[in-house]
Image (spheres, rainbow, N blue to C red):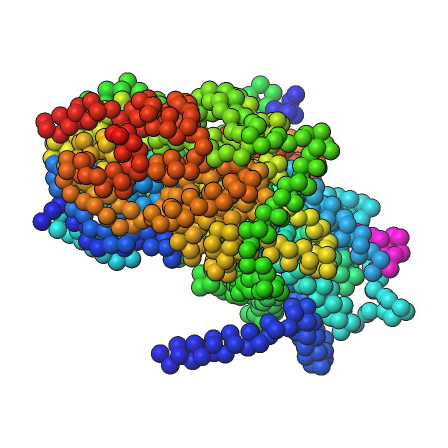
Amino acid sequence: MHAFLEYTVTGLTVGSFYALVALGYTIVYGIIRLINFAQGDLSMVGAFLGWTLLVPLGFEHLPIYLAVVAAFLIPMLGTAVINLGILQFAYKPLLRRSLLAILITALGMSLLLQNTVLLVYGPSIDAYPPNLVPATGFYVGPVHVTYVQTALVAVSLLLMGGLVLFVQGTTIGTAMRALAQDHDAARLMGIDVDAIIRVAFVLGAMLAAASGVMLGIYYIQIQFTFGFLLGLRAFTAAVLGGIGNIPGAMAGGFLIGLLEAYTTGYVSGKWEDVVVFAVLIGVLVVKPTGLFGERVAERM
Amino acid sequence: MALLEVRDLHVFYGNIEALKGISLDAEPGQIMAILGGNGAGKSTTLRAISGLLRPRSGSITFGGRSIVGLEAHVIVGMGLSQVPEGRRIFNVLTVEENLNLGGYMVRAHRELVRTRKASVYRLFPRLAERHAQLAGTLSGGEQQMLAIGRALMSEPKLLMLDEPSLGLSPILSRSVLKTVRQVANQGTAVLLVEQNARQALAIADHACVIETGTIVLEGDAATLAKDERVQKAYLGGFEAMASG
Amino acid sequence: MIGLLADRRIGRALASSREQLTRFPFWVRVIVFLAIVGGVVLLNGDNYVTAVAVSVATYAMLGLGLNIVVGFAGLLDLGYAAFFAIGAYTSALLMTQAHWNFFATLPLAVLFTGTAGAILGYPTLRLRSDYLAIVTLGFGEMTRIAITNWDYAGGPNGVWNIPWPSAFGYEFNTQAAFLVVSLCLLAIAMIFAQNLDHSRLGRGWVAMREDEFAAEAVGVPTLRLKLLAYVMGGMWAGLAGAFFATRIGTIDPTSFTFQLSVLVLIVVVLGGTGSLPGVLLGALVVVALPEVLRQFATYRILIFAILLIGMMLLRPQGLWPRVRRKPKPFYGLRDDEARDVSEEILREHQLQVAARGRHLAKAGHPEVGQGEVLLKVRNLAQQFGGLRAVEDLSFEVLRGEIFSIIGPNGAGKTTVFNCITGVKKPRQGSIEFNGRSVVGLRPHVIVSRGIGRTFQGIRLFKLMAVFENVMAGLYPRHRAMTWQAMLHTPGERREEVQTLQESRRWLSFVGLEHAAGRLASELSYADQRRVEIARALASHPQLVLFDEPAAGMNPPEKAALVGTIRKIRDLGITVVLIDHDMSLVMRVSDRIAVLDQGRLIAMGKPDDIQQDPRVIAAYLGREEDELDLAEARGA
């Protein structure tokens, strides 16, 4: 039982990273039906931007709150700008044309981001300052929970809450949900579809960058390849929850995190992916639109 | 000069010419009915005016400005609103959220959105009762009211309706059309696409009949209602046999 | 400007030389081309260049297989490396553990990968393509991890010392020899892929890719075709994998990553999805470009990524897009065929219907006779999201009559058609055709039971020629096997010619023989509707459902339509018609049902319907409504 709770804590922590990246996939997919394969790599870019601020630029020596806030906000903005650039130059010309071509472009973008980072930062592993957040923790009953875990889960819940408020509570958010259903009807409301797509890309990139910085703080070590694996897990999470569905992406993220932690704990780390994908395929066979996905109305 | 002037409009789907030179006008306070069978080009005309389709040639001026080639959302901002065929309300949003989106252009002025919503609710009290309900769960008639209410949220100078009576009982469609008349009487120009010719001609001021992409008849609605050619061209043998 | 002119001139020259080339059959062209390429590379004699050429050939083989899945069938696959791995390991283990000859392992490698395709395909058939992306990706990763953890196959170290292939005492152990073997395998893969593309199966795939819903509704078994695409795609990869194993000599799980799946997908899409020469070109770019860029060392992949994005932006359709085969309609048919095709059609139709009748009678389901109840709908109900589309509807259609369903838009007419053809499962009620229930059957099964249909919004396969559209409608009537299609056997050829002949007859039946070779999307609405009718008739139905066939037609076209509908009835086919044009409906129908708000409000002969006050009220509104509304205007 004790072990089970420990795994649960780890699973929830990692799951919150997945959930953030999965939200990016889901928001963009919901609006333009594009699987933005560069999503995970945006997270990696965010992690490196955060590292640049903290280590080479010495932000780690600032008071901790200032350092953390800057290390989150600046990468989030920077990544958002990058994602807007990607949208404008690589995806926009292909929207409404060939979905397959745009998918390949997205895969190319993923390669491009990885190799740009490789070029700038080199292939070696960089390390976040290990004591940014005190490494100690506290006990909840028998289970040891670190401050880092608590803080990270709290931040991601905060971000997710903010996103939900934005999407549910504002007119722009309502427009995003409307666009997911019917582009033409939305245009007839006077909604500038391109502007909303830009909003989605900004939000997706910001969430991805935040998760990247969190990953850096949690695992300390970062390398230019981690975005790919993260993206894969997050994409799986988004599909598991029902791609295009916001609560689904969050639930999917936590679910995959837990699944992974339990598999590693009880079976072996070797079989992580197999279990994750087996569950995914099992769920899709039973419910082809994912756990929370709605039936998409078939056109007649 | 009329509020909306469409001249010699040609629209193609691929190689197929769907509109072969349509010209029509819409004036404030007046209803222009566009009649014709399924596939004749009625919806295409509306979609070309609202910017959802690009015409191959021809001119569309609205309030003296050409609107050919403008994005649909820009045209909406100029005061032209369309209720699309089949209502196309946002099923996943609530009634209230649907109306909020209708007021998207003025979203920064919360007060304005609120007063306009209030007047839509006055026009359709049923919507007020169901304001928190998901739009997908409304009945057909309520969905049509919502679609019209949503279009009115932008206080358009020109309202275009594509088959508002679709799937409604005669009583309901009559009440919907009456509302449309009320809207027009307040000074809005209305373009009304209808398959229910008799009802449409009864409330319209002017009308035209489209057949395979061309206007074959046009004129005063009351005159057209009595015109034998309308009965032939659009109502087929039904009208003739109903009276004979 | 000059450049443009030159371009055009070159284009013209290319076009004419292409025409020259197409005089030779495809297999000759493939063999000659590959022989020349092989000859040039071998004469060059550079071992490095030869090795790169072998890699290109391997990727091309993989690309051809994935092209069947992605290009022909339109299914996304991001886990294709798994098939490559299964093929490689099967062959490698058989050679190292059981000491089989390389060539003897090929059938098993192909068999295993084909089976793997079925295993992957079966549970995923109903998924939309975006979901397929992740499921196939997962399949690829699972396979790789399973191999990594499989001790018998060497775990992470893989299989070592895989022997060279040998045949007739000759051992293939130089790059040159491998090039020869790989080009031979590639030629086989090319020719088979081409034959598949141009068979009934290929037509089914294209139809499915263009409009899955319509394909199923005209009788193409889409689920089976998807499964078949996975199996075929897997088999190609098995071949390539086996070859890869023996050539490299050592295989381990790191050769079969997601990156490989992506590279193969790039080969297909970059070359031009669905295009066979495109695959060759794509393989060349994907393999050779990084080799050329080798001098840039660390920048290599970066430049590759930029070039890849650039190429996709400039040519979203691929470098060598699939050219639509200039259709030579009725190629190989006698022009002096009997002019009176209707007679021919009648005979053919009677033969087909009689054959089906015998078949059904043998199975204990005799058909109903003339004038008896052919279609029986009882208490049908259907609703969508709170809207009742059809409520408690019952009616019967007699064999041999023309039965019309009328009512205002939104009355539920099309919903009735969708329930009958299996597109929508009714909430309640029963539908019997020929005395047997059809509720719950897949649409293509219902087509083979003898019900054909057209669609309100025209749903032709837009990028197929008109005659190919009609041929797609013949899908359920023919039974050439897949292997026959692949080998292009005489039996298959005969059947293709028959199919062609029949589609020609149906086209002349609706008066469109002259437009046979044009793309469906180039025709006018009226002609497109006529093609839909021909496509529906091609399956030799007993009952056809026409959904607003007159929409968008002008009066002369409508008059011609009346004639066509009567001719169809004269063939012995029962017709159910939905339309708004009252004069047409009244002229042609034996009986009419009137729907309003999803309910049946009247049914009877045209004369009775015309006098029914309820019908007139529902359809036209009442006189007092007019006064009421006119008052509003006066206000």
Query: Bounds of the magenta span?
Result: C90-101
| Residue at 50% in and 61% down | C517
- C182 w.r.t. A30: above or below: below
Task: Return the x and y of residue A161 as percentages of the image width and height.
Answer: 40, 30
Quadrant, the C terminus of chain C: top left
Q: Is residue C412 magenta?
A: no
Task: Return the x and y of residue B209 as percentages of the image width and height.
Answer: 24, 43
| Residue at 49% in and 22% down | C394
Q: Main secondary structure of the magenta part?
A: helix
Task: Return the x and y of residue C15 as percentages of the image width and height.
Answer: 51, 74
Q: Nearer the viewer, residue C474 or C358?
A: C358
Residue C316 visible within the image: yes
| Residue at 65% in and 70% down | C25
| Residue at 68% in and 68% down | C27
Q: Nearer the viewer, residue B141 or C170?
A: B141
Task: Return the x and y of residue C591 as percentages of the image width and height.
Answer: 44, 30
| Picture quadrant of residue B97 | top left
Residue C367 as seen in the image, left or right of residue B91: right
Residue C512 as seen in the image, left or right of residue C343: left
Quadrant, the N terminus of chain C: bottom left
Q: How many marks?
A: 0
| Picture quadrant of residue A206 | top left
- C625 w.r.t. C108: above or below: above
Residue A212 as seen in the image, left or right of residue C54: left
- A291 w.r.t. A42: above or below: above
Residue A128 visible within the image: no
